[in-house]
Amino acid sequence: MAVSAKRDLPIFFNSDGGLLREAVQIGSILRENRMTVGVARTVAEGCHRGSPLDDACRRLMQSKREHKARLYFGGARCASACVYAMVGASTRHVDPGAKLPINSNTGREIEKTNNSLRRYVVAMGVDPGLVDAAAKIPSRSSRELSRGEMERFGIETRGLYETPWFAYHGPAGEFLLLKSVTYPTGDTADEYRTRTVGLACSRSSTNIRFMYHQELTAKESRTPPMIRAKIGDSLIDLTTLNPQKDLVERSFDLEPRQLQSAIETGSFEIAEMFDQSMIKTPSRVVRFSTLGRLTSLRWNQNAHQRGDPQVFRRLHLPQINHPSSAERKATVF
């Protein structure tokens, strides 16, 4: 992986799946290294295109470290746990000839595992509805995702993409809401970065904790941008002079009135401004929509002090609220 990252080479999956925990670990490594992935079969020169590999091809593949090979997208697949490894990559391509079969997980605490997966995919910039769709398919069978589902869930990076808000309980019993925006960057806009915002409340505080996570390119990490959040009518400085591992991670407390103001405004705004003498990257403003789940919530001060999930008065709040087309279109200037 370290060698591949230095050479900036894409990785291609062709897998029937495997262990879920290891798949998430692979996805996290891909994101840490800002990798690009696709779904394709690599066939080394001297091997036949047929599958599975014959003994002669296996011996050829094992004879040296690198081989000249051809990529074939038709018939390639990334199934089951492989999908969760793939979505960890920063930039993802799925050729129309490739397939992504999904199915449910197995184990004793399936719902706990699925909630962990939902948090993981949102942090990767993917709709947690992917996990819900997989949970409906028995583990001994599978169903291929349609191209429409791949687009709806944000599996393939293509333009701007915003996840819905995802609600869950943290390890200390706090109530949290999480969402992310993925957008193109780089000189040719063929690289993607994800920003994540979270809201948390607990018994220990009368305020709401606002959490912000932003990925940086290598250039941006060397010359960090000035970052400012607009929450309702409040401006908050998020600038980090020494980001760790190409990341900006900040958190701060919001008063209930500030959150309510942002809900009424319709979005949170995160602006980043670069020193143009050091890096020729234009300033950007990313808006995180408060439509959907946040719009249907109202602040409940008494419940907040109890650490109750009814901290927000619910009007119509399903377990996972898929956003409308208006919500899904994040805005970057």
Image (spheres, grey):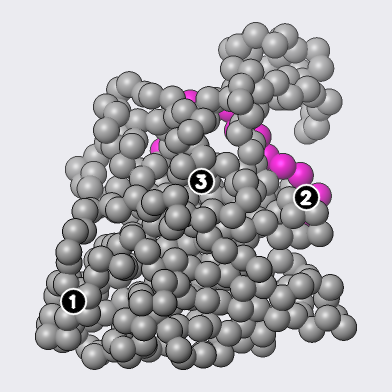
In the rendered structure, which segment of residues is drawn in magenta? 6-19
At 57% across and 58% down in the image, what residue appears? 182
Residue at figure coordinates x 76%, y 60% from the top left:
186
In this view, 258 is above or below 104: below
Callout 3: SS: loop
Q: Is residue 266 above or below residue 43?
A: below
- Residue at the disc numbered 3: 154
Q: Are marks 1 and 2 in contact (CB under 8 Å)?
A: no
**Residue type pointed to by label 1:** Val
Q: Nearer the viewer, residue 52 or 275?
A: 275
Q: CA distance from mark 3 to mark 2?
A: 23 Å
Q: Which residue is mark 2?
A: 8
The tag earlier along the polypeptide, 1 or 2, is 2
- Residue at disc 2, secondary structure: loop
The relative height of residue 155 versus residue 291 in the rendered view (above or below) is above
Please say whether residue 97 is visible from this viewpoint.
Answer: yes
Q: Is residue 7 magenta?
A: yes
Question: On the image, which quarter does residue 254 sit in?
Answer: bottom left
* Residue 95 horizontal/vertical position (percent): 64, 29
Q: Earlier in the sequence, mark 3 or mark 2?
A: 2
> Can you tell which mark lies on residue 311?
1
Is residue 246 among the parts visible in the rendering? no
Amino acid residing under circle 3: Gly
